[in-house]
Image (cartoon, grey):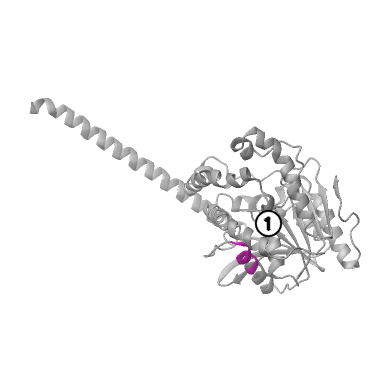
Amino acid sequence: MQQNRKPEGRVRRIMRQTALGLGGLVILLAASGALYNTLELHRLRAAYPPPGKIYAVDGHAMHLYCLGAGSPTVVLESGRAESFLVWGKVQPALSRTTRVCSYDRAGLGWSEATEGPRDSEHIASQLHGLLAKAGIDGPLVLLGHSAGGLYIRGYRARYPDQVQGLVFVDATMPEKTPPHLAALVHHEGLEVTIFQMAIALGIPRLLGDCSTPPPGFDATANLWRADACKPSYVTAYKAESKAWPLAVSEVERAEGLDDLPIVVLSRDTHLPPPHNLAAAVPKTELEQDGRNHDAAQEALVHLSSRGRRIIAQGSSHYIHFDRPALVVREARSLVQSLRTGRDQPGLGTTITQ
Protein backbone atom coordinates (compact mmCIF):
# COMPACT_ATOMS: atom_id res chain seq x y z
CA MET A 1 0.00 0.00 0.00
CA GLN A 2 2.76 2.43 0.81
CA GLN A 3 4.47 1.74 -2.50
CA ASN A 4 1.22 2.47 -4.32
CA ARG A 5 0.95 5.87 -2.64
CA LYS A 6 4.46 7.06 -3.44
CA PRO A 7 3.78 8.06 -7.08
CA GLU A 8 0.66 9.96 -5.98
CA GLY A 9 2.70 11.82 -3.36
CA ARG A 10 5.30 12.75 -5.93
CA VAL A 11 2.60 14.09 -8.27
CA ARG A 12 1.16 16.22 -5.49
CA ARG A 13 4.59 17.61 -4.66
CA ILE A 14 5.19 18.43 -8.31
CA MET A 15 1.78 20.12 -8.59
CA ARG A 16 2.40 22.10 -5.40
CA GLN A 17 5.84 23.19 -6.58
CA THR A 18 4.44 24.12 -9.99
CA ALA A 19 1.67 26.16 -8.36
CA LEU A 20 4.19 27.92 -6.14
CA GLY A 21 6.39 28.60 -9.14
CA LEU A 22 3.51 30.01 -11.15
CA GLY A 23 2.41 32.09 -8.18
CA GLY A 24 5.92 33.44 -7.82
CA LEU A 25 6.03 34.23 -11.51
CA VAL A 26 2.73 36.10 -11.29
CA ILE A 27 4.01 38.10 -8.31
CA LEU A 28 7.26 38.85 -10.14
CA LEU A 29 5.38 40.03 -13.25
CA ALA A 30 3.03 42.16 -11.14
CA ALA A 31 5.94 43.72 -9.27
CA SER A 32 7.75 44.35 -12.55
CA GLY A 33 4.67 46.04 -14.06
CA ALA A 34 4.20 48.22 -10.99
CA LEU A 35 7.87 49.17 -10.94
CA TYR A 36 7.83 49.97 -14.66
CA ASN A 37 4.78 52.21 -14.25
CA THR A 38 6.39 54.03 -11.30
CA LEU A 39 9.73 54.55 -13.04
CA GLU A 40 8.12 55.70 -16.29
CA LEU A 41 5.91 58.18 -14.45
CA HIS A 42 8.96 59.53 -12.61
CA ARG A 43 10.90 59.87 -15.87
CA LEU A 44 8.09 61.63 -17.73
CA ARG A 45 7.23 64.01 -14.90
CA ALA A 46 10.90 64.96 -14.53
CA ALA A 47 11.17 65.59 -18.27
CA TYR A 48 7.89 67.51 -18.57
CA PRO A 49 7.16 69.66 -15.50
CA PRO A 50 3.83 71.50 -15.25
CA PRO A 51 3.64 74.98 -16.79
CA GLY A 52 2.16 76.68 -13.74
CA LYS A 53 3.41 77.38 -10.23
CA ILE A 54 3.34 75.15 -7.17
CA TYR A 55 2.07 76.70 -3.94
CA ALA A 56 1.93 75.22 -0.43
CA VAL A 57 -1.67 75.20 0.79
CA ASP A 58 -2.12 73.85 4.33
CA GLY A 59 1.20 72.07 3.97
CA HIS A 60 0.36 70.41 0.65
CA ALA A 61 1.66 71.31 -2.80
CA MET A 62 -0.99 72.57 -5.25
CA HIS A 63 -0.56 73.47 -8.90
CA LEU A 64 -2.04 76.68 -10.38
CA TYR A 65 -1.62 77.75 -14.00
CA CYS A 66 -2.58 81.28 -15.03
CA LEU A 67 -2.48 82.96 -18.44
CA GLY A 68 -3.41 86.45 -19.58
CA ALA A 69 -4.21 89.60 -17.67
CA GLY A 70 -7.26 91.58 -16.68
CA SER A 71 -10.27 91.43 -14.42
CA PRO A 72 -12.36 89.55 -13.53
CA THR A 73 -10.21 86.42 -13.28
CA VAL A 74 -11.78 83.30 -14.77
CA VAL A 75 -11.06 80.17 -12.70
CA LEU A 76 -11.58 76.81 -14.40
CA GLU A 77 -12.88 73.86 -12.35
CA SER A 78 -12.48 70.43 -13.95
CA GLY A 79 -14.77 67.43 -13.71
CA ARG A 80 -14.15 64.53 -11.39
CA ALA A 81 -10.70 62.89 -11.70
CA GLU A 82 -9.49 65.39 -14.31
CA SER A 83 -6.50 67.72 -14.26
CA PHE A 84 -5.97 71.24 -15.58
CA LEU A 85 -4.99 69.72 -18.93
CA VAL A 86 -8.62 69.32 -20.01
CA TRP A 87 -8.80 73.11 -20.54
CA GLY A 88 -6.08 73.14 -23.19
CA LYS A 89 -8.51 74.14 -25.95
CA VAL A 90 -10.16 76.88 -23.89
CA GLN A 91 -7.63 78.59 -21.60
CA PRO A 92 -5.17 79.97 -24.21
CA ALA A 93 -7.93 81.52 -26.33
CA LEU A 94 -9.89 82.94 -23.39
CA SER A 95 -6.70 84.39 -21.88
CA ARG A 96 -6.59 86.90 -24.73
CA THR A 97 -9.54 88.59 -23.01
CA THR A 98 -8.70 88.34 -19.30
CA ARG A 99 -6.65 86.40 -16.78
CA VAL A 100 -7.62 82.72 -16.79
CA CYS A 101 -6.44 80.19 -14.19
CA SER A 102 -6.76 76.43 -14.18
CA TYR A 103 -5.59 74.22 -11.34
CA ASP A 104 -5.36 70.67 -10.05
CA ARG A 105 -7.51 69.59 -7.14
CA ALA A 106 -5.83 67.58 -4.41
CA GLY A 107 -4.56 64.23 -5.65
CA LEU A 108 -4.96 65.18 -9.32
CA GLY A 109 -2.44 66.42 -11.85
CA TRP A 110 0.49 67.97 -10.03
CA SER A 111 -1.27 68.66 -6.72
CA GLU A 112 -0.57 66.47 -3.71
CA ALA A 113 -3.30 64.39 -2.14
CA THR A 114 -4.71 65.52 1.18
CA GLU A 115 -6.42 63.68 3.98
CA GLY A 116 -9.97 64.39 5.01
CA PRO A 117 -13.27 64.54 3.12
CA ARG A 118 -13.44 65.80 -0.47
CA ASP A 119 -16.78 67.59 -0.16
CA SER A 120 -17.54 70.95 -1.74
CA GLU A 121 -16.66 72.99 1.35
CA HIS A 122 -13.19 71.45 1.67
CA ILE A 123 -12.56 71.78 -2.07
CA ALA A 124 -13.67 75.42 -1.99
CA SER A 125 -11.47 76.13 1.04
CA GLN A 126 -8.41 74.68 -0.69
CA LEU A 127 -9.06 76.61 -3.90
CA HIS A 128 -9.52 79.80 -1.89
CA GLY A 129 -6.22 79.17 -0.12
CA LEU A 130 -4.49 78.49 -3.43
CA LEU A 131 -5.78 81.70 -5.01
CA ALA A 132 -4.78 83.67 -1.91
CA LYS A 133 -1.23 82.28 -2.13
CA ALA A 134 -1.11 83.49 -5.75
CA GLY A 135 -2.39 86.93 -4.79
CA ILE A 136 -5.78 86.50 -6.48
CA ASP A 137 -8.63 87.75 -4.31
CA GLY A 138 -11.31 88.48 -6.90
CA PRO A 139 -13.44 89.43 -8.57
CA LEU A 140 -13.87 85.96 -10.04
CA VAL A 141 -15.87 84.22 -12.73
CA LEU A 142 -15.96 80.48 -12.02
CA LEU A 143 -16.33 78.05 -14.91
CA GLY A 144 -17.02 74.41 -14.04
CA HIS A 145 -17.55 71.23 -16.03
CA SER A 146 -19.63 68.26 -14.85
CA ALA A 147 -18.97 67.73 -11.12
CA GLY A 148 -16.97 70.96 -11.25
CA GLY A 149 -20.32 72.72 -11.69
CA LEU A 150 -21.32 71.65 -8.20
CA TYR A 151 -17.96 72.70 -6.80
CA ILE A 152 -18.20 76.23 -8.19
CA ARG A 153 -21.64 76.55 -6.63
CA GLY A 154 -20.06 75.48 -3.34
CA TYR A 155 -17.32 78.09 -3.73
CA ARG A 156 -19.83 80.83 -4.45
CA ALA A 157 -21.86 79.82 -1.37
CA ARG A 158 -18.75 80.02 0.82
CA TYR A 159 -17.18 83.16 -0.71
CA PRO A 160 -20.05 85.09 -2.31
CA ASP A 161 -18.29 88.47 -2.26
CA GLN A 162 -15.56 87.19 -4.56
CA VAL A 163 -17.74 85.70 -7.29
CA GLN A 164 -19.29 87.88 -10.00
CA GLY A 165 -20.53 85.18 -12.36
CA LEU A 166 -20.70 81.45 -13.09
CA VAL A 167 -20.40 79.42 -16.29
CA PHE A 168 -21.63 75.81 -16.22
CA VAL A 169 -20.34 73.38 -18.86
CA ASP A 170 -22.81 70.48 -18.92
CA ALA A 171 -22.66 70.69 -15.17
CA THR A 172 -24.13 68.21 -12.73
CA MET A 173 -27.45 69.25 -11.23
CA PRO A 174 -27.66 66.71 -8.39
CA GLU A 175 -31.00 67.97 -7.08
CA LYS A 176 -32.53 66.70 -10.34
CA THR A 177 -30.47 63.54 -10.86
CA PRO A 178 -32.73 60.59 -11.86
CA PRO A 179 -32.55 57.53 -9.56
CA HIS A 180 -30.97 55.30 -12.23
CA LEU A 181 -28.10 57.77 -12.70
CA ALA A 182 -27.54 58.05 -8.96
CA ALA A 183 -27.40 54.24 -8.80
CA LEU A 184 -24.77 54.22 -11.54
CA VAL A 185 -22.19 55.52 -9.06
CA HIS A 186 -22.55 52.28 -7.12
CA HIS A 187 -22.43 50.23 -10.34
CA GLU A 188 -19.09 51.83 -11.15
CA GLY A 189 -17.63 50.98 -7.74
CA LEU A 190 -16.37 47.52 -8.65
CA GLU A 191 -15.09 48.70 -12.03
CA VAL A 192 -13.18 51.54 -10.40
CA THR A 193 -11.58 49.14 -7.89
CA ILE A 194 -10.51 46.77 -10.66
CA PHE A 195 -9.16 49.68 -12.68
CA GLN A 196 -7.23 50.91 -9.64
CA MET A 197 -5.60 47.51 -9.26
CA ALA A 198 -4.75 47.39 -12.97
CA ILE A 199 -3.08 50.80 -12.87
CA ALA A 200 -1.15 49.92 -9.71
CA LEU A 201 0.18 46.83 -11.50
CA GLY A 202 1.12 48.84 -14.59
CA ILE A 203 -1.18 46.88 -16.90
CA PRO A 204 -2.54 49.86 -18.90
CA ARG A 205 1.00 51.13 -19.48
CA LEU A 206 2.19 47.70 -20.60
CA LEU A 207 -0.72 47.66 -23.05
CA GLY A 208 0.21 51.09 -24.41
CA ASP A 209 -2.87 52.85 -23.04
CA CYS A 210 -0.92 55.63 -21.28
CA SER A 211 0.67 57.32 -24.28
CA THR A 212 -2.16 58.77 -26.38
CA PRO A 213 -3.74 62.09 -25.39
CA PRO A 214 -7.30 62.98 -26.48
CA PRO A 215 -7.65 64.24 -30.08
CA GLY A 216 -6.74 67.88 -30.54
CA PHE A 217 -4.35 68.12 -27.58
CA ASP A 218 -1.12 67.69 -29.52
CA ALA A 219 0.41 70.85 -28.03
CA THR A 220 0.29 69.33 -24.55
CA ALA A 221 0.72 65.67 -25.53
CA ASN A 222 3.84 65.15 -23.41
CA LEU A 223 2.12 66.56 -20.33
CA TRP A 224 -0.82 64.20 -20.89
CA ARG A 225 1.63 61.30 -21.03
CA ALA A 226 3.36 62.50 -17.87
CA ASP A 227 0.01 62.59 -16.09
CA ALA A 228 -1.48 59.34 -17.38
CA CYS A 229 -1.96 56.12 -15.42
CA LYS A 230 -1.34 57.59 -11.96
CA PRO A 231 -2.76 55.41 -9.16
CA SER A 232 -3.53 58.57 -7.16
CA TYR A 233 -6.15 59.55 -9.74
CA VAL A 234 -8.37 56.63 -8.84
CA THR A 235 -7.86 57.33 -5.14
CA ALA A 236 -8.92 60.96 -5.68
CA TYR A 237 -11.91 59.84 -7.75
CA LYS A 238 -13.08 57.45 -5.03
CA ALA A 239 -12.60 60.11 -2.34
CA GLU A 240 -14.71 62.65 -4.25
CA SER A 241 -17.35 60.00 -5.00
CA LYS A 242 -17.54 59.05 -1.34
CA ALA A 243 -18.02 62.70 -0.33
CA TRP A 244 -20.50 63.43 -3.11
CA PRO A 245 -23.69 63.09 -0.99
CA LEU A 246 -22.19 65.50 1.54
CA ALA A 247 -21.16 67.92 -1.20
CA VAL A 248 -24.70 67.86 -2.59
CA SER A 249 -26.26 68.52 0.80
CA GLU A 250 -23.87 71.44 1.39
CA VAL A 251 -24.86 73.08 -1.87
CA GLU A 252 -28.56 72.40 -1.31
CA ARG A 253 -28.36 74.18 2.07
CA ALA A 254 -26.77 77.24 0.47
CA GLU A 255 -28.76 80.23 -0.62
CA GLY A 256 -29.91 80.50 -4.24
CA LEU A 257 -27.97 82.35 -6.89
CA ASP A 258 -30.40 85.30 -6.79
CA ASP A 259 -29.50 87.70 -9.61
CA LEU A 260 -25.95 86.40 -10.18
CA PRO A 261 -25.12 86.37 -13.92
CA ILE A 262 -24.81 82.75 -15.06
CA VAL A 263 -24.42 80.89 -18.36
CA VAL A 264 -25.43 77.24 -18.76
CA LEU A 265 -23.92 75.28 -21.64
CA SER A 266 -25.57 71.89 -22.19
CA ARG A 267 -24.71 68.85 -24.27
CA ASP A 268 -26.74 67.75 -27.27
CA THR A 269 -29.13 65.11 -25.92
CA HIS A 270 -29.83 63.85 -29.44
CA LEU A 271 -26.39 62.22 -29.50
CA PRO A 272 -26.02 58.57 -28.42
CA PRO A 273 -25.58 58.17 -24.64
CA PRO A 274 -22.14 57.57 -23.13
CA HIS A 275 -21.00 53.95 -23.26
CA ASN A 276 -21.20 53.46 -19.51
CA LEU A 277 -24.84 54.51 -19.50
CA ALA A 278 -25.70 52.33 -22.48
CA ALA A 279 -24.13 49.33 -20.71
CA ALA A 280 -25.61 49.88 -17.25
CA VAL A 281 -29.04 51.47 -17.75
CA PRO A 282 -32.17 49.87 -19.25
CA LYS A 283 -33.21 51.14 -22.67
CA THR A 284 -36.50 52.54 -21.42
CA GLU A 285 -34.66 54.67 -18.88
CA LEU A 286 -32.09 55.77 -21.45
CA GLU A 287 -34.88 57.11 -23.64
CA GLN A 288 -36.01 59.21 -20.70
CA ASP A 289 -32.48 60.34 -19.86
CA GLY A 290 -32.36 63.09 -22.50
CA ARG A 291 -35.56 64.64 -21.18
CA ASN A 292 -34.31 64.36 -17.62
CA HIS A 293 -31.05 66.06 -18.57
CA ASP A 294 -32.85 68.93 -20.27
CA ALA A 295 -35.08 69.42 -17.25
CA ALA A 296 -32.06 69.45 -14.93
CA GLN A 297 -30.24 71.99 -17.08
CA GLU A 298 -33.33 74.20 -17.20
CA ALA A 299 -33.59 74.01 -13.42
CA LEU A 300 -29.94 75.00 -13.18
CA VAL A 301 -30.29 78.11 -15.34
CA HIS A 302 -33.32 79.23 -13.33
CA LEU A 303 -31.38 79.22 -10.07
CA SER A 304 -30.67 82.85 -11.01
CA SER A 305 -32.91 85.55 -12.42
CA ARG A 306 -30.05 86.50 -14.76
CA GLY A 307 -29.31 83.19 -16.43
CA ARG A 308 -29.21 82.03 -20.04
CA ARG A 309 -28.75 78.60 -21.58
CA ILE A 310 -27.18 77.40 -24.82
CA ILE A 311 -27.51 73.81 -26.04
CA ALA A 312 -24.27 72.96 -27.85
CA GLN A 313 -25.45 71.29 -31.04
CA GLY A 314 -23.42 68.21 -31.96
CA SER A 315 -21.50 68.22 -28.69
CA SER A 316 -21.06 65.48 -26.14
CA HIS A 317 -20.76 65.97 -22.38
CA TYR A 318 -17.26 67.38 -23.08
CA ILE A 319 -18.30 70.63 -24.70
CA HIS A 320 -14.84 72.10 -24.03
CA PHE A 321 -13.42 69.28 -26.21
CA ASP A 322 -16.06 69.27 -28.96
CA ARG A 323 -17.05 72.97 -29.10
CA PRO A 324 -14.26 74.93 -27.35
CA ALA A 325 -14.97 78.08 -29.36
CA LEU A 326 -18.50 78.15 -27.93
CA VAL A 327 -17.19 77.92 -24.36
CA VAL A 328 -14.66 80.70 -25.05
CA ARG A 329 -17.26 82.92 -26.72
CA GLU A 330 -19.79 82.65 -23.90
CA ALA A 331 -17.23 83.09 -21.12
CA ARG A 332 -15.79 86.09 -22.92
CA SER A 333 -19.26 87.58 -23.36
CA LEU A 334 -19.95 87.23 -19.64
CA VAL A 335 -16.62 88.87 -18.74
CA GLN A 336 -17.28 91.79 -21.06
CA SER A 337 -20.82 92.27 -19.72
CA LEU A 338 -19.44 92.42 -16.18
CA ARG A 339 -16.90 95.02 -17.25
CA THR A 340 -19.50 97.22 -18.90
CA GLY A 341 -22.23 96.65 -16.32
CA ARG A 342 -24.68 95.64 -19.06
CA ASP A 343 -26.57 92.36 -19.05
CA GLN A 344 -25.92 89.76 -21.69
CA PRO A 345 -28.68 89.52 -24.30
CA GLY A 346 -31.18 86.69 -24.02
CA LEU A 347 -31.51 86.41 -20.26
CA GLY A 348 -34.05 83.77 -19.31
CA THR A 349 -33.90 82.05 -22.69
CA THR A 350 -32.70 78.68 -23.98
CA ILE A 351 -31.33 78.42 -27.51
CA THR A 352 -29.61 75.75 -29.59
CA GLN A 353 -26.44 76.69 -31.46
Does the rendering let one see residue 17? yes
Q: In the image, is residue 316 part of the stretch drawn in magenta?
A: no
* Picture quarter with the C terminus: top right
Q: In the image, is residue 120 part of the stretch drawn in magenta?
A: yes
Residue at 53% across, 51% down: 40
Q: Does residue 61 appear left or right of residue 266 in this picture?
A: left
In front of the other: 65 or 208: 65
Q: In this view, does 30 lie above or below 101?
A: above
Residue that label 1 marks: 148
Position in image of residue 337 (x %, y %): 88, 63
Residue at 77% across, 48% down: 266
Position in image of residue 9 (x %, y %): 17, 31
Give, as a single range, the part of the protein colored magenta: 119-125
Q: Does residue 31 appear left or right of residue 15 in this picture?
A: right
Q: Does residue 162 appear left or right of residue 116 in this picture?
A: right
**Label 1 amino acid?**
Gly
